């Protein structure tokens, strides 16, 4: 997002954070009114510094509705993001606070808690500075300045309204896509700017609305606003809403009331079921800055959401039972308990913060003939409904108070269903329009039922159904099914015997520990397909896997019982990635394919780590997969690569880390190799280490090597001990490789197998780049400095050097002692006269 005055505001925040002080933990509060740009500014700050930390998290904590469950979820998400581990879970908030402190107490972390509105959020996510390692920075954004008082946040930054110059620049960015108005729009632009009172959100929304509109449209919009005797920001935002077509308004109100933060594909399913043309409608709302799409989820600013909900209230003259949409649990409870509904109601979301029992009559929905959306959570009904509107498009009611739906209800229009599958069994319903089904987390289902009538089903989610034992064979023959996920179903013994799913693009059965059978494929499936079946009990893949012509990605990590791979797997024409880590029986299966013609021409990535590979098995891999670019064979038993690796003519990345028996590597690696990870290969002989050093002389772009500690060769252009690497340069930034030799850590830190090394590039003491690299003690890390940058960033660095001599320093932030470092200049790409080392001798004298 465009930010006026980004540089100086971010610079002010950096000064408050005092990033150079690495022995303290700092809390910073960013506060200001809604729509002022707190989140945007915090994101800009985060993006500019996050690479300086061991772990980071940008967490929107304002999207919670249930304080108990959502705070626990936020704690898990916080730790998962920082530790990059998506398997983190615990029972309650108290356990979460203890784990955050224990796991992060020695890490230097950057955390942004965005949109904090309750002191409990702050206390349970970042309660004390002592929870985090020295040098950590915690940033809180909030509308409530008093909350910062309660949290004892001393450092604060108030985001203020934009001044006239900044307001005009921001408005023009959205209205004209440049920094100043067109000549015949100057006066109108000043009027528009005055309407927005310096609030960035209003300037963005109004500017987006007026983009490419003629003068008459501008005048009409501004006249309507200025005629209001008490014009405020909501009325500015309302201008964009009033210009929408009817279906676009309906989409906007549905998102504002029910679907903010929900996945785009799910929301589009519900909207399309109501004939709202979601694709074009959502695009229009995004273009008008009323919606944003981030990580495939729909979002809108709080003020815009408030406006949408206020519109719903106004249209009903504040009569609750006549509102088109009900979203606040107290309003919903009042309407249901008083039987005060009407045909005006199109959507209901009942989701109280604490479990609630409701006493209402069994025909409470009978007056709501036009109800499209019904979402009921965390609520117990005293009576099971005897009536549900036939107009329903979304039924989201996982704890429905009966085993069956009302006898007179026929769900022919339901497009999305979230609930118990038992509701679908009582009689032969026709699910002609059902496209989305989610029963995740349902612990009452042991057998997934026959859904052969739901032939339009496109997405099926069964994740976390802990008591699910089997899935009906009809699921294997749904012609329109695009995505099927049944991960973490720990009791699932059987999927389906056969499948023919010609539309399938994604299949996931992760952590189904008792699932032992991979289904046979009955016909050609040509759609691009990704399959992930890691940590299952599957023993073999069927020969019929040859029918998966569209298969591009197959991952079966941790399938310890997997013993057989059919030859047909290696003949799939579009397979690009194959991950078979921790499958100890597979090497034997591979050996039978030596000499067989391989047509798996597109395979680029193979992960065979921790599978007990021998030297003979490596030869097999070379024979079967000659075109690999990325090979991971780490944590294996082989001892010699001299006769195998050289035959991979396209190989760019080789991971042999933790291969403790590895002694030999070829003297000449393939010319394509850029990255070699040989961490903890402590048996590696001197000859092989030299082969890795020689990669530097080849002046490889983006070269990166990790290996056990060795002396830096004398043919490096400069070698020094102790202090950090620094040299002088002018003109074009030199292309150089830098080697770091790290020593042994103290006893306290030995528990960590690898320790983070923060590598900072500074030009005249100004930090230009940062990279975090995990390095074991007594190891060498060797890299082409350009590997830290994208192409565009590298060009910017070159501009930063200029014609005058500039001091360039590579600073390492780590607990590992730096024993020595060396620099090798790529002569083919650098002017040797424009480089000097600390001795002040020009590089050309070497």
Image (cartoon, rainbow, N blue to C red):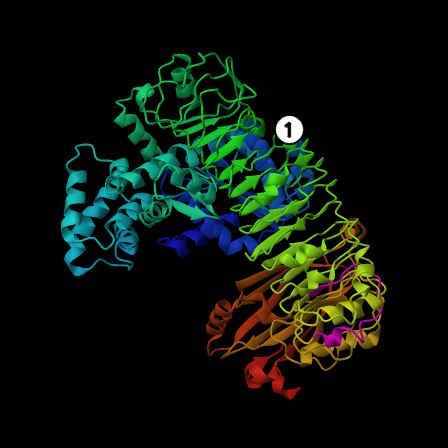
Total numbered labels placed on residues in the image:
1
Find residue 740 and report its horizontal and vertical position in percent.
Answer: 70, 68
The reply, left or right, for residue 30 in relation to residue 592 is left
Q: Which residue is drawn at the image coordinates 68% and 31% (left, top)?
A: 467
Quarter that holds the C terminus: bottom right
Find residue 209 and report its horizontal and vertical position in percent.
Answer: 26, 48
Q: Which residue is drawn at the image coordinates 62% and 78% (left, top)?
A: 837
Q: Relative to 772, say whether 306 is above or below.
A: above
Quarter of the view holding residue 674: bottom right
Quarter of the view holding residue 688: bottom right
Q: Relative to 267, say whether 210 is above or below.
A: below
Find residue 252 and report its horizontal and vertical position in percent.
Answer: 34, 38
Report the magenta stretch's main SS: loop
Circle 1 residue: 443
Q: Is 645 included in the stretch rendered in magenta? A: yes
Label 1 Cα crowd, 10 Å radius (few <14 / some 14-19 / many 20+): some
Find residue 25 and report its horizontal and vertical position in percent.
Answer: 59, 44
- Whether residue 636 is visible, yes or no, is no
Q: Relative to 248, say whether 150 is above or below.
A: above
Q: Which residue is drawn at the image coordinates 17% and 55% (left, top)?
A: 185
Specify start and end residues of the magenta stretch as a single range: 631-648
The reply, left or right, for residue 701 in relation to residue 711 is left
- Whether residue 841 is visible, yes or no, is yes
Q: Secondary structure at mark 1?
A: loop
In the foreground, 177 or 135: 177
Q: Is 553 included in the stretch rendered in magenta? A: no
The reply, left or right, for residue 608 in relation to residue 139 is right
């Amino acid at each position: 997002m465009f930010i006026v005055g980004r540089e100086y505001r971010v610079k002010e925040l950096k000064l408050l954070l005092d990033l150079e002080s690495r022995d303290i933990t700092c809390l910073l509060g960013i506060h200001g009114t809604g729509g002022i740009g707190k989140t945007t500014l915090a994101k800009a700050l985060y993006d500019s510094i996050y690479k300086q930390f061991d772990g980071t998290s940008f967490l929107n904590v304002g999207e919670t509705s249930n304080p108990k469950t959502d705070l626990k979820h936020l704690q898990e998400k916080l730790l998962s993001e920082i530790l990059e581990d998506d398997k983190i879970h615990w029972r309650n908030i108290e356990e979460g606070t203890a784990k955050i402190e224990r796991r992060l107490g020695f890490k230097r972390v950057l955390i942004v808690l965005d949109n904090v509105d309750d002191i409990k959020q702050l206390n349970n996510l970042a309660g004390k500075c002592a929870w985090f390692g020295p040098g950590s920075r915690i940033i809180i954004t909030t509308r409530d300045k008093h909350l910062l008082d309660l949290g004892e946040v001393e450092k604060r930054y108030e985001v203020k309204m934009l001044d006239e110059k900044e307001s005009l620049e921001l408005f023009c960015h959205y209205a004209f896509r440049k920094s100043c108005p067109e000549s015949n729009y100057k006066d109108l632009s000043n009027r528009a700017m005055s309407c927005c009172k310096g609030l960035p959100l209003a300037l963005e929304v109004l500017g987006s609305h007026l983009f490419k509109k003629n003068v008459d449209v501008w005048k009409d919009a501004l006249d309507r606003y200025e005629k209001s005797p008490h014009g405020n920001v909501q009325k500015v935002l309302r201008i964009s809403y009033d210009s929408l077509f009817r279906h676009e308004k309906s989409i906007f109100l549905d998102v504002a009331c029910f679907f903010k933060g929900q996945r785009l594909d799910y929301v589009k399913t519900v909207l399309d079921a109501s004939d709202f043309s979601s694709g074009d409608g959502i695009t229009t709302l995004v273009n008008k800055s009323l919606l944003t799409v981030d990580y495939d989820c729909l979002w809108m600013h709080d003020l815009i959401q408030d406006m949408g909900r206020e519109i719903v209230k106004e249209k009903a003259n504040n009569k609750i039972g006549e509102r088109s949409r009900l979203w606040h649990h107290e309003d919903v409870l009042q309407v249901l308990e008083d039987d005060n509904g009407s045909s005006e109601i199109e959507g209901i979301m009942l989701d109280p913060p604490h479990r609630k029992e409701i006493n209402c009559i069994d025909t409470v929905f009978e007056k709501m003939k036009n109800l499209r959306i019904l979402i009921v959570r965390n609520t117990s009904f005293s009576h099971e409904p005897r009536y549900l509107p036939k107009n329903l498009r979304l039924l989201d009611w996982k704890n429905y108070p009966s085993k069956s739906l009302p006898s007179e209800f026929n769900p022919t229009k339901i497009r999305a269903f979230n609930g118990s599958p038992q509701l679908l069994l009582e009689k032969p319903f026709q699910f002609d329009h059902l496209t989305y089904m989610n029963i995740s987390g349902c612990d009452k289902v042991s057998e997934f039922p026959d859904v052969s009538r739901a032939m339009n089903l496109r997405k099926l989610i069964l994740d976390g159904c802990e008591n699910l034992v089997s899935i009906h064979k009809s699921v294997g023959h749904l012609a329109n099914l695009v995505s099927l996920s049944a991960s973490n179903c720990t009791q699932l013994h059987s999927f389906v015997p056969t499948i023919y799913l010609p539309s399938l693009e994604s299949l996931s059965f992760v952590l189904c520990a008792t699932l032992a059978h991979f289904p046979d494929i009955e016909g050609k499936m040509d759609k691009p397909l990704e399959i992930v079946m890691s940590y299952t009990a599957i023993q073999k893949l069927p020969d019929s896997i040859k029918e998966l012509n569209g298969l591009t990605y197959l991952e079966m990590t941790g399938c310890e019982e997997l013993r057989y791979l059919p030859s047909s797997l290696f003949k799939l024409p579009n397979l690009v990635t194959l991950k078979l880590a921790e499958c100890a029986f597979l090497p034997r299966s591979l050996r039978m394919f030596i000499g067989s013609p391989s047509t798996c021409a597109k395979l680029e990535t193979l992960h065979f780590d921790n599978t007990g590979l021998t030297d003979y098995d490596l030869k097999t891999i070379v024979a079967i997969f000659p075109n690999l670019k990325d090979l991971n064979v780490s944590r294996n038993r082989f001892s010699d690569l001299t006769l195998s690796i050289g035959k991979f003519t396209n190989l760019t990345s080789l991971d042999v880390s933790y291969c403790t028996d590895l002694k030999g590597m070829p003297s000449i690696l393939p010319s394509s190799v850029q990255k070699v990870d040989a961490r903890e290969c402590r048996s590696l002989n001197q000859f092989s280490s030299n082969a890795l050093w020689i990669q530097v002389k080849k002046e490889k772009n983006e070269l990166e090597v990790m290996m056990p500690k060795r002396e830096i060769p004398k043919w490096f252009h400069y070698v020094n001990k102790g202090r950090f690497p620094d040299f002088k340069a002018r003109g074009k930034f030199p292309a150089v490789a830098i080697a770091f030799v790290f020593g042994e850590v103290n006893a306290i830190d030995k528990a960590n197998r690898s320790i983070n090394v923060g590598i900072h590039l500074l030009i005249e003491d100004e930090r230009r780049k940062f990279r975090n690299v995990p390095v074991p003690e007594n190891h060498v890390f060797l890299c082409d400095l350009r590997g830290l940058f994208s192409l565009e960033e590298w060009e910017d660095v070159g501009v930063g050097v200029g014609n005058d001599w500039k001091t360039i320093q590579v600073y390492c932030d780590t607990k590992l002692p730096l024993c020595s470092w060396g620099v090798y200049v790529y002569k083919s790409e650098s002017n040797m006269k424009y480089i000097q080392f600390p001795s002040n001798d020009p590089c050309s004298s070497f």
